[in-house]
Image (cartoon, rainbow, N blue to C red):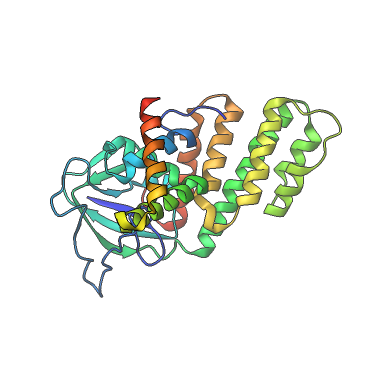
């Protein structure tokens, strides 16, 4: 694939997904990001899934998470931060 | 300023999912702000005629953007916007024709590459394609001899364009054509040239002053 200035790759799109959802992209980045979504079904679908995940996660309460699962998740996050 | 905006079916923003208030009779739609208190990162987006091929979707609307609107990349941004009228000429038939023409352009680019490689018969087969089935067959034909890398890549784009060449994927196929043009010329700037051709196609067909 020939690199085109101003065109984001799918890998770059994935890296920007959370910033997009949290409104942290600059106007130029936002334009590049949304332009990619016009032609890339894969990235559009990934964004849709991330939005669904965010909606579902916001509905979760602390007591919805089994204690063992919560402990193993916290441990995984701590390990990831240490690394 | 007067600009244009592609929306999903039902005058819905394809990215935010927000529904735009439609015009009623002779009255324009209500003004829409990107947020109750517009900040520097939140804008209403519109297209100039040359921007159209980058944003194709199911519906096309003529819109008014509040002043000052500023150009950025392939769009213009303003604090507020409102729908003026739907451009009815952008319908299933024009989407289908635009998608087909972009796919066939991809075939022509592959044909040019094959002709430069001395593969005249294969080039002719691509340049005479009139339908997506023709294009798929020509792109998928088993060559007698190995095909050089650039032509092979362009034949791959033809296969992609034929596969995705439905009106619902006009944005994808027009992108494939633009990338194929850049690959043929070995120059990323050819993307802009091909997008300009697509913008002229849209403006001519839809009666938009370029």
What residue sits 44% from the left and 46% below the top? A37
Relative to B80, say whether B107 is above or below. above
Residue at (61, 29) in percent of width and height: B184
Single out the residue that lies furthest toward the left.
B37
State left or right for residue A32 relative to residue B68.
Answer: right
Classify residue B64 by image quadrant. bottom left
* Residue toward you, B76 or B9: B9
Residue B91 vertical position relative to residue B176 in the rendered view, above or below: below
Kindly give the residue lying farthest to the front in the view shown.
Answer: A68
Instruction: Give the x, y percent position of residue B113.
Output: 68, 30
The x and y percentages for residue B172 are 53, 47
Q: Nearer the viewer, residue B186 or A47?
A: A47
In the drawing, does residue B49 fall left or right of residue B139?
A: left
Query: Residue at 48% across / 34% down in the picture?
Result: A11
Q: Residue B186 at what x, y percent from top left?
A: 57, 24
Which residue is painted at 72% across and 48% down in the image?
B136
List x then y, in percent, for residue B166. 59, 56
- Please say whether residue B74 is visible from this viewpoint: no
């Amino acid at each position: 694939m020939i690199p085109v200035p101003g065109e984001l790759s799918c890998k770059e799109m994935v890296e920007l997904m959370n910033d997009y959802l949290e409104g942290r992209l600059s106007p130029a980045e936002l334009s590049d990001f949304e332009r990619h979504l016009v032609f890339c079904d894969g990235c559009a679908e990934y964004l849709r899934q991330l939005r669904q995940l965010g909606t579902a996660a916001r509905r979760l309460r602390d007591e919805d998470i089994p204690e063992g699962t919560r402990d193993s998740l916290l441990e995984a996050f701590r390990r990831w931060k240490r690394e | 300023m007067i600009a244009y905006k592609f929306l999903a079916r039902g005058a819905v923003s394809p990215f935010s999912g927000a529904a735009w208030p439609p015009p009623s009779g002779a009255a324009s739609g209500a003004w829409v702000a990107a947020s109750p208190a517009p900040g520097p990162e939140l804008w209403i987006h519109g297209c100039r005629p040359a921007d159209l091929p980058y944003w194709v979707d199911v519906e096309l609307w003529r819109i008014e953007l509040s002043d000052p609107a500023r150009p950025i990349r392939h769009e213009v941004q303003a604090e507020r916007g409102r729908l003026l009228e739907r451009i009815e000429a952008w319908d299933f038939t024009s989407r289908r024709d635009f998608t087909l023409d972009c796919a066939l352009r991809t075939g022509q680019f592959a044909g040019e590459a094959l002709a430069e490689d001395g593969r005249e018969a294969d080039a002719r087969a691509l340049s005479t394609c009139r339908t997506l089935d023709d294009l798929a067959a020509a792109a998928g034909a088993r060559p007698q001899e190995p095909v050089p890398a650039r032509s092979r890549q362009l034949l791959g784009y033809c296969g992609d364009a034929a596969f995705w060449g439905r009106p619902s994927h006009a944005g994808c196929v027009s992108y494939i054509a633009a990338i194929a043009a850049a690959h043929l010329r070995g120059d990323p700037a050819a993307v802009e040239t091909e997008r300009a051709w697509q913008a002229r196609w849209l403006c001519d067909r839809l009666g938009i002053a370029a």
